[in-house]
Image (cartoon, rainbow, N blue to C red):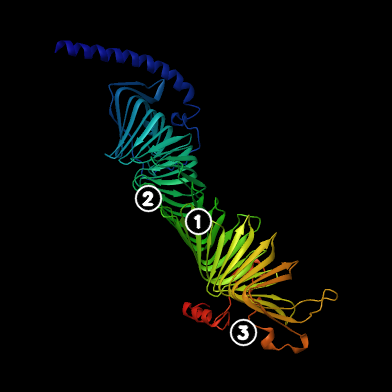
Amino acid sequence: MIKNSLKKYLKLWALFFVSILIFDASAQRLQKKLPQKKSSETLSPKKEIVAESTNTSMIYLENSDILLFDKDRLPDVQVLVGNVCFRHDDIYLYCDSAYFYESKNSLDAFSNVKIIQGDTLFVYGDVGYYDGNTRMARLRKNVRMENKSALLTTDSLNYDRMRNVGYFFNGGQLEDSLNVLVSVFGYYYPATNTANFRKKVKLTNPKFVMHSDTLNYNTNTNVANILGPTHINYEEETHIYSERGWYDTKNELAELLDNSYVENQDTKRLIGDTIFYDKKKGLARAYRNIELADTLKKVSLFGNYGFYNELTEEGLATDSAMMIEYSGGDTLFLHADTLFTYADSVYKVVEAYHNVRFYRTDLQGIADSASYQTRDSTLQLMYSPIVWSDDQQIIGDTIRAYMKNGSLDKAHVIGAAFACQKKDSIHFNQMIGKEFWAFMQEGNLYKIESNGNAQSIFYPIDEADGSFIGLNTTQSSYLHTYFKDGKVDKVLIFPSPVATMYPMDQLTKEIMFFPNFVWKQEYRPMRKEDIFLRFDRKKDEVGNSSRKKRTSKSGTK
């Protein structure tokens, strides 16, 4: 017992003599510095925004092992050493030693500085400066601010108790139970658990990394508010970009605004003015100016509403919907009321429903419904389709157009096939059959094969003056027509063909036209913008009676 008391006594005397040495050296230093500026300003590297309290309270010294005071040399300074404790309002400040400026209601704290506010906020540092009038605390070196939901670490922190905000200006880190954030500048509001970080912001999550210029974050909800250009990267999986919105880092939910997109590593990208994204379920919905792009297959869907399911690879676009396919030298522009896409093995399929219109420089057409497959670059048109190429028009129950190397290679017309070529305002070469095969060569039509009950009407031309020789009608099971320079070059009819030639002066309407003749040039898209034009096709008499009956049931307009 006596031994312990002696040790304590000797320790106090040693501390006392050390304090005298410290005080003497400090007094000389402070005498030089105090007239120039307040000691509370010595550590401020940045201009601070502080406010004088309208209800100023005094700082009270609660404890110190040693107190040194020289009224003559430094009348405004008290040097405190050992277990120093101050109280101001509802906070306590602890340190190993301090300079206390009682008349100025401020202090400088050194070594193991700790500020405690209630049971929720703790601030630590190697050095601290506190002004009781402005309620501003400045901590330097190895600084930590802790509350129940987060830990803020930095080398320099100003804690404004008037506004209940801590801010750093030379790099800092905020860590909660889920994420770690770093930035150059940052503000943290312990009462609301919110932070505002600026410049080189990086949020690290176990699943992703977020880079931003400006970010607001709530350590209680784990929601990041995006206020500037922001990238969210799931390694080798998903890349998200937005310039405004929010991201729930816990539930992986997002609302993205302003130049936003969600991109998968498998080359799928969804763009829209507004995107709602559920990463866990792989679902994204987009509104206004949307684009669902597949950069590998070179197919994009556009519209004002769309969604995409990453797990099933299903997507939809509607409201001014358009598909663009650009795999070859020519580009296909296709519009429909609704566009639906899905994956067939590794290939993409796009289905178009109602009021289909499309444009390519070498091919144009309309239909009620259509589908496009990247497997063999096939465009299939269904229910009252009409296709135009150069001066040719083709109609059938179903038309399939096959692309090769970016150009139209061939077309298959299935059911009630009808083709015509305009010679002048009243004369048309025509062909009908159960099915057609049309073949292209170097971008030009060079052959049409009509199979099954094949019939034709065409006008042979006098090569000398270019006039019509007459009208020739043929009928057989098969009819193959060859073209050269856009004109009929030769006709092959088999077996047992029946042919009749009519002089031009004996032609009647019944001879000149098949019963199902129709020429709908006014419907033809002449440029890519024309795909959005709409026509009432209820009264169209397109094709034979069976097709008209089928069209009526489908409700095609």
How crowded pointer 2 is (Cα within 10 Å; few <14, some 14-19, many 20+) is rated as few
x, y (%) of residue 101? 38, 29
Q: Amino acid at mark 1?
A: Lys
What secondary structure is marked by label 1?
A: strand
528 or 478, which is in the foreground? 478
Labelled disc at residue 280: 2
**Number of numbered discs present?**
3
106 or 550, which is in the foreground? 550
The residue under label 3 is 515
Q: Residue at x 47, y 34 (%)?
A: 171
x, y (%) of residue 9? 22, 13
Q: CA distance from mark 2 to mark 1?
A: 24 Å
Q: Amino acid at mark 3?
A: Pro
Horizontal relation, residue 446 to residue 102: left or right: right
The residue under label 1 is 348
In the rendered structure, which disc, 2 or 1, sits on the residue that comes first in sequence? 2
